[in-house]
Image: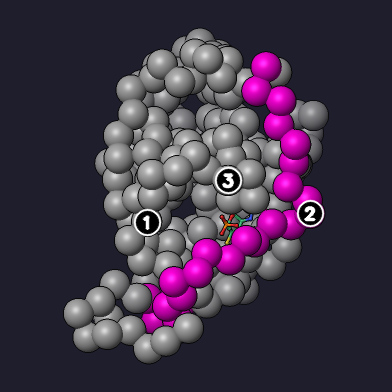
Amino acid sequence: MKEPDADVAHRVPPGQTLTTKWPVLTYGLTPRVDLRRWTFRCFGAVERELTWTWEEFLKLPRVTVRSDIHCVTRWSKLDNEWEGVPARVIIEQARPKPGTAFVLQHADPDYTTNTAFADLLDDDVVLAIRHNGNDLEPDHGGPMRLVLPKLYFWKSSKWLRAFEFLDVNPPGFWEQNGYHMHADPWTEERYSDQETRAMQQMRAEAARRLRERS
Ligand SMILES: Nc1nc2c(c(=O)[nH]1)N[C@H]1C(S)=C(S)[C@@H](COP(=O)(O)O)O[C@H]1N2
Ligand SMILES: [Mo]
């Protein structure tokens, strides 16, 4: 860890320290993935539910983007090069219904995190399979993880398996355990007690509706 040089200081959000290492942060164990059974799925409020096998997923158009990682545990890692399928490509194929405002990411093993639909549409949001020229290591989410660089990194699911399109905003795993619904590192949206009253009501309402549905 070191103090950022002046030329990159503007890229380091408040309360963060730079690292050149890449820590592994997983709740639980790295899942073992069988690529013959792996699928990625879009479901919920979509015109058609879609499922890609690994072979099909590899045929989707890919881009290479460069971005910075900001973890809520206060480390940041600059200049990561990610190769992956733009989230927008996936969303265009799934065609979310009007009124879709949120996406719940479902990942192995039993990890979820909620995101505003609009936050997935940025050019640098990718379903990544490679990092700095190498296949993504299992500990870092291989074979595929989301990268959503403008939010704290817990909003980037490793071992991503599905997008659920929703008109409500249910809290995901960390969001049910004290962390913020939105997670903007520039305004330090770290903890749920910093949420607006409206957002806290929305989280309670959405959690209740999802419980009723299941
Ligand atoms: N499936 C899954 N995705 C996850 C996590 C997890 O525990 N399980 N941890 C999150 C957290 S808190 C962070 S900071 C990043 C860490 O990614 P890394 O281990 O590649 O640094 O992954 C996020 N995505
Ligand atoms: Mo994290």
Colouring: one colour
Earlier in the chain: of badge 1 and badge 3, it is 1
Mark in the foreground, 1 or 3: 3
Element at badge 2? loop
Residue at the spot 46% in from the left edge and 31% down from the top edge: 100
Image quadrant, ligand 1: bottom right
129 within the magenta span: no
- Identify the amino acid type marked 2: Gly
Up/down of 89 relative to 185, above or below: above
From the viewer's perspective, is 78 left or right of 35?
A: left
Identify residue for label 3.
Answer: 137
Identify residue for label 1.
Answer: 80
CB of mark 2 near ligand 1 (< 8 Å): yes
17 within the magenta span: yes
Asked if disc 3 and disc 2 are in contact, CB closer than 8 Å, the reply is no
Residue at the spot 70% in from the left edge and 18% down from the top edge: 37
Up/down of 87 relative to 30, above or below: above
Mark in the foreground, 2 or 1: 1
Residue extent of the magenta highlight: 13-36
Q: Which mark is residue 28?
A: 2
Q: Based on the displayed image, in which of its 4 quarters is residue 105 positioned?
A: top right
- Identify the amino acid type marked 3: Glu
Q: Pick whichever, 4 or 206, lies toward us.
A: 4
Earlier in the chain: of badge 3 and badge 2, it is 2
- Identify the amino acid type marked 1: Asn
From the viewer's perspective, is 72 left or right of 31?
A: left
Which quadrant does the C terminus fall into? Answer: top right
Q: Give the CA separation, mark 2 to mark 1.
A: 25 Å
Q: Pick whichever, 80 or 183, lies toward us.
A: 80
Up/down of 73 relative to 201, above or below: below
